[in-house]
Amino acid sequence: MKIGHCLIRLESCTSTNDIAREYALKGAAEGTVILAKEQTQGRGRQGRAWYSPKNKGLYLSIILRPPISGLSLLPLLAGLAVEEALHRMGVSVGLKWPNDLVWSGRKVGGILSEGNYSGNRLNFAVVGIGLNLHHEEEDFPQRLRQSAASLRQISGAGVDKQAILPRLWKAFNRWYGLFLSGKAERIVEAFQKGCLFPLGAGLIVDGEEGKVRGRYRGIDRWGGLILECRGKQRSLYAAEIKSVREAKEA
Ligand code: BTN
């Protein structure tokens, strides 16, 4: 089934990712979307909360039943789909590996991709998308006011949720279609193009082994961040970019 053809709209819920998981466990088809006006326990990556006040943002989760290989490309392709949908509405945002949508150094959206497994078998994945649409500064908690922004703050007008959805389904179906047909390189290439910083940028990345410093060398075909540290290249998957310095070399 195409993504967005079955849309379940909720006034309020804990987290659309949790509701999507419940539906998926009951057998909901691939492409089913849960969309809520507010979340009371919205979640971000690394155990963080995703602040989700009523009617201020886009909070949705998509049920996918993909093959297990290349699963870490899902947040990247979801980011590309959101970026493309926004671009078609005249709003330009950048991508920050692995899951942030950023404008002028501020986070406007994020992706939370979660898998459900039986042993090594993937049962389904849920891709959650959060986008700040209509927040004014005072709608963000104090601690986020310097680092977060909404599309209203960017564009002056905000982006209408109903207008963005069809564009999002279209873009998501296209990127997910490429993923299913094994065209990982197309996703990687586009992500590198939309990436906020150039090849060769100096990064500090917080990963499983703590903070690592290195040079950005691209994205691998599984969606990992290629970092060169002391002349050796390695791919990082579960990590977060903490700071970016200018590129000295390409
Ligand atoms: C992040 O940047 O840390 C990811 C944020 C993801 C937020 C979305 S909002 C819809 C879905 N439901 C959740 O609880 N989280 C995701």
Image (cartoon, grey):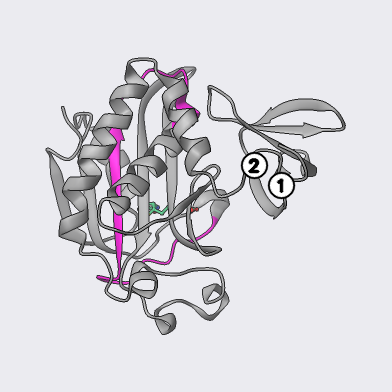
Considering every residue shown, the one lying at the far front of the view is 249
Three-letter amino acid code at the position of disc 2: Ala
154 vs 44, nearest the viewer: 154
Query: What kind of element bears circle 1?
Result: strand
Picture coordinates of residue 214, whole percent (x, y): 78, 40
Tell me where the magenta segment starts and ends, as one range: 48-73
Upstream in the sequence, badge 2 or badge 1? Answer: 1
- Name the residue located 79 percent from the left edge and 42 percent from the top edge: 212
Query: What kind of element bears circle 2?
Result: loop
> Is residue 150 found left or right of 49 in the rendered image?
left
Quadrant for the N terminus, please: top left
- Name the residue located 32 percent from the left edge and 51 percent from the top edge: 87
> Is residue 128 found left or right of 54 in the rendered image?
right
Picture coordinates of residue 61, whole percent (x, y): 30, 46
* Marks 2/1: CA–CA distance: 5 Å
Three-letter amino acid code at the position of disc 1: Asp
> Is residue 222 found left or right of 18 in the rendered image?
right
194 vs 143, nearest the viewer: 194
Which residue corresponds to mark 2? 239
Q: Is residue 162 visible?
A: yes
Tag of residue 226: none
Q: Is residue 171 above or below residue 143?
A: above
Picture coordinates of residue 240, whole percent (x, y): 63, 47
> Is residue 81 found left or right of 231 in the rendered image?
left
Is residue 68 within the magenta segment? yes
Picture coordinates of residue 52, whole percent (x, y): 36, 66
Quadrant for the C terminus, please: top right
- Name the residue located 31 percent from the left edge and 28 percent from the top edge: 176
- Name the residue located 32 percent from the left edge and 76 percent from the top edge: 156
Which residue corresponds to mark 1? 206
Total count of labels: 2
